[in-house]
Amino acid sequence: MQGNEQQAYDRGITIFSPDGRLYQVEYAREAVKRGTASVGVRTADGVVLAADRHARSPLIERDSIEKIHEIDDHVGVASAGHVADARQLIDVARRQAQVNRLRYDEPASVESLTKEVTDYIQQYTQTGGARPFGVALLVAGIEDGEPRLFETDPSGTPYEWQAVAIGGSREDIQTHLEDEYTDEMDLEGGVELALRALASVNEDGLDATGVDIATIDVETQQFSKLPEDDIAERLAEFELGGDE
């Protein structure tokens, strides 16, 4: 399709092109690719989220850059893409988690939370006067004693994964995950794989201040972020740190 013909369809979110494409949704996916990478790894005894949160400028306060968020005691989310869009979707997930506890006196399942978020995302692919969310999320948690890991897409489609990357350099990171992942690995092995996957596309190595890591283990079913000192120890142990 030539430029002028494409413009007739890419200005309206509710209009399919003759070849069945929603251009605004495709553009939203491009926005995700412009974000720094996040990785999720499901292991035998839990699930790991890791995210590259390096600052664009040395003047930015590192603590103001947050890519991994707690949704409920047993669920966490990592994002890639527009941060403001991610915040809105995280609020949707948190509200639904609270509603489930108040209404049913039990935690929401990871799958149902993911579908609530993707249903919300999907509404913005067929509503006039709005645009799709330029962000992808990894939703990770424990459900019925089993680790679960989902990806949300700007189209509103949920996918379940054993290991997955979103954001910049996704294809290269995904290749690393496919080569190195085994479903027998434990939580510590999942942390190592996630860090190595992020490092595989970072020629300068990783910095503990520029990486977020969270785990949720099957035994405690508690979301837990790794302190910066623990991340630094692992980077040194795995020889993934940048030059001093």
Image: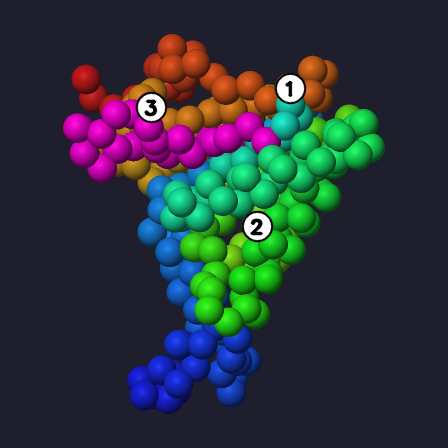
Q: Quadrant of the N terminus?
A: bottom left
Instruction: Say left or right for 95 vs 174.
Output: right
* Residue highlighted by disc 1: 222
Crowd band around label 2 with a 10 angstrom C-alpha radius: few (<14), some (14–19), many (20+): many
Is residue 145 shown in magenta?
Answer: no
Task: Work out whether residue 62 or residue 130 is closer to the camera in this orientation and state it.
Answer: 130
Q: Does the CB distance between marks 1 and 3 fall below 8 Å?
A: no
Dot label at residue 152:
2
- Earlier in the chain: of badge 3 and badge 2, it is 3
Where does residue 45 sit, x and y in percent of width and height? 68, 23
Q: Is residue 128 left or right of residue 64?
A: right
Residue range of the region highlighted in magenta in the rendering:
49-71
Residue 239: x and y, percent? 34, 20
Nearer mark to the viewer, of 1 and 3: 3
Q: Which numbered tag is attached to residue 149?
A: none
- 40 shown above or below 64: below
The residue singled out by tag 3 in the image is: 63
The amino acid type found where label 3 is placed reads Asp
Residue 174 visible from this viewpoint: no
Quarter of the view holding residue 145: top right
Q: Residue at x 55, y 28 (%)?
A: 70
Q: Please, is residue 75 above or below residue 130 in the view?
A: above
From what the image shows, is residue 55 above or below residue 83? above
Between 88 and 69, the residue placed more toward the observer is 88
In screen coordinates, is 1 left or right of 111?
Answer: left
Secondary structure beneath label 1: loop
User: Which residue is pictured at 69% across the width and 21% down the height?
Assistant: 221
Asked which secondary structure carries label 2, the reply is strand
Q: Position of residue 36 (x, y in %)?
A: 36, 42
Q: Residues within 10 Å of mark 1 (few under 14, many from 20)?
A: some
